[in-house]
Amino acid sequence: MRKLMILKSVIDFIWILSCIPILILGFAFSIYMFFNTEILELTRFTGFEIEAPVWQKQLFIILGYSIVCGFIYVIFLFRKTLRLFQQRRPFDSYVIETYNKMGKVLIGLSIASMIGVFILRIVFTSKIEFTLGLSPYLLIMSLGLFFMVLSESFKIAKQAQQDSELSI
Amino acid sequence: MAILINLDVQLEKRQMKSYELADHIGITTANLSILKTGKARAIRFSTLEAICKTLDCQPADILEYVPD
């Protein structure tokens, strides 16, 4: 249980110090960029220095923010399941459903970010780039599939637990 | 479920109460109720043996197969 406590503390730390500020600042930035387009000059620091119409930059920032929100949602769900682990209810239906949902969201996010970055490179740098080998998108997709497998395993474990409890 | 538990019939024949049987075989009345209502997923041989010993009957007197 000590490892669980450490994990919960790390996730809480990430949640409070990263997720909440990113959500607030990202939202504020997304709104503000429509009123003051000069703020979009910040995108120069991200490596995309090619001149592009303002609306394209705004669109990609909105898309990027949506993907980040998706990841934050996954952390939010994971944090909730850890609470159930602390209550010694690892095979709760909520955990099973949430892990499955987290898996689906992560796979969706990895595909969305892969396509997003691919289009971003074409639009902003006029380059078509394929990366083979270890890429973060594949790792995120694998993580999503892992959560789905974990959900299936928990479902089987729950069934076994019920069978054991109902054996007289 | 295709397996019926005729524990009620056997208890009635012997004028025995559920809690008395539960006491004899060493299980809780709640578990005996699960068994009687057919909610149990499995029955241990040791439990079956204890029931048969207490009620002086055969497993077939308690368990009955009814096709669905």
Image (cartoon, coloured by chain):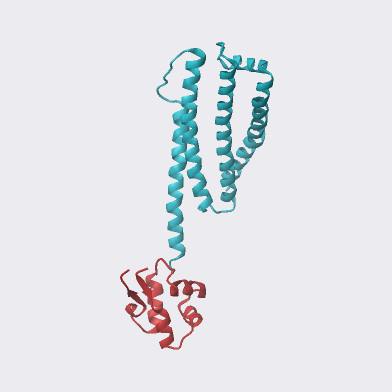
Chain colours: A cyan, B red
A13 vs A123: above or below: below
Q: Residue at x 57, y 30 (%)?
A: A66
Q: Nearer the viewer, residue A125 or B10?
A: A125
Counting the numbered discs, the total is 0
Looking at the image, residue A51 lies above or below residue A168: above
In the rendered structure, the answer to whether residue A30 lies left or right of residue A157 reads right
| The C terminus of chain B - image quarter | bottom left
Q: Residue at 57% across / 50% down in the picture? A: A84
Q: Residue at x 56, y 46 (%)?
A: A81
Left or right of A73? Residue A31 is right
Residue B15 in view of the camera: yes
Residue A90 seen anywhere in this rendered image of the structure? no
Choose between A69 and A5: the one closer to the eye.
Answer: A69
Residue A30 placement, left or right of B32: right
On the image, the x and y values in percent for residue A42 come to: 63, 17
Q: Nearer the viewer, residue A142 or A41?
A: A41
Which quadrant is home to the N terminus of chain B? bottom left
Where residue A33 appears, x then y in whole percent?
A: 66, 21
Hey, which quadrant is residue A60 in on the image?
A: top right
Q: Position of residue A10 (x, y in %)?
A: 61, 38
Image: A105 above or below A162:
above
| Residue B66 position by quadrant | bottom left
Q: Position of residue A148 (x, y in %)?
A: 45, 43
